[in-house]
Image (cartoon, rainbow, N blue to C red):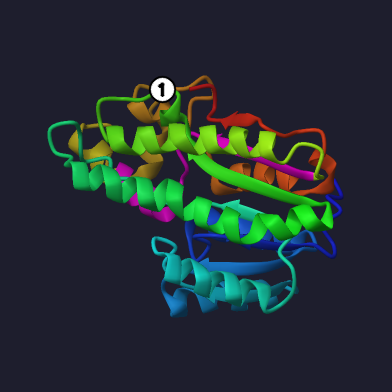
Amino acid sequence: MELKLHGKRALVTGSSGGLGEETVRLLAAEGASVVVHGRDAARTAAVAEAVRAAGGSATTAVGDLGTDEGADAVTAAALAGGPVDILVNNAGRYDMSVDWTTTTPADWADIYNTNVISGVRMIQRLVPAMRARGWGRVIQVGSVTGELPQTTQPHYAASNAARANLARSLARELRHTGVTSNVVVAGGILVPGAVERLTAVGRERGWGDTWEEIAANRDTAFAANDVGRIGEPREYADVIAFLASPLSAYITGSALRVDGGW
């Protein structure tokens, strides 16, 4: 499908690896100019170079979105190459090892700043210009835990409920402007770090020795959805790219669950 992204510029936060990297690669392959963001300059530059080597257009923006100063620096770098038409707030973090007994109020405040307020910072800096131009796409990348929280990492689940809420509120704010706001509600994503962690867990629980063995075992908690496996990064990036395109003009204020039927 032709997504009609030629001439559009997209900033994907947290795109120096994982799902963000997959997303900028796909957006660039579809014709968009991309801004690769990360906190590590070398990793961020490597992704941008890979995009350019594949024939795409990419620049970089390095900074910590957890502070106003960092968000200002990222915004300045992103806008140096021209207006930003598409904002994908993908940057965030999680910690599957913690629960109600091991998280402190400071942990809750920190993850809320990283997963929610960092996105708000970028919305406030970039969306007014989208509104003025009469076109734009704002996409939050959240988690199904915001709708189906578990006992583990409750602060992460709460931050994802907030991500979905802000996406819907922003859609109301942007009504009749040509700018849409949506959230992708993600299940598990098989980025390299997740494979490493899940392999270790699978070995501890006797589900197999290699990831291939563990992933093929339908009795594991990793297959606890209707599809029976964890999603690949490209499967999520495809949805994000569609929402970023002109083809999604009639979708706003929506939470699209991409979770294999969790």
Is 194 in the magenta? yes
Residue at horizontal 65%, vertical 30%? 254
57 on left or right of 4: left
Location of the N terminus (image quadrant): top right
**How busy is the neighbourhood of tag 1: few (under 14 within 10 Å), some, or many (20 plus)?**
few
Residue at horizontal 67%, vertical 79%? 80
88 on left or right of 179: left
The magenta span reads: 179-198
Percent position (x, y) of residue 67? 39, 64
Of 176 and 87, nearer the camera is 176
Q: Is residue 216 visible?
A: yes
Residue on which the image places disc 1: 148
Quarter of the image where one finds residue 158: top left
Is 47 in the magenta? no
Quarter of the image where one finds residue 124: bottom right
Percent position (x, y) of residue 187? 48, 34
Percent position (x, y) of residue 226? 52, 19
Residue at horizontal 66%, vertical 48%? 138
Percent position (x, y) of residue 68? 44, 65
Of 226 and 172, nearer the camera is 172
Tag 1, which secondary structure?
loop
Residue at horizontal 45%, vertical 80%? 42
Look at label 1 and name its amino acid.
Answer: Leu
Q: Is residue 22 visible?
A: no
Of 202 and 135, nearer the camera is 135
30 on left or right of 37: right
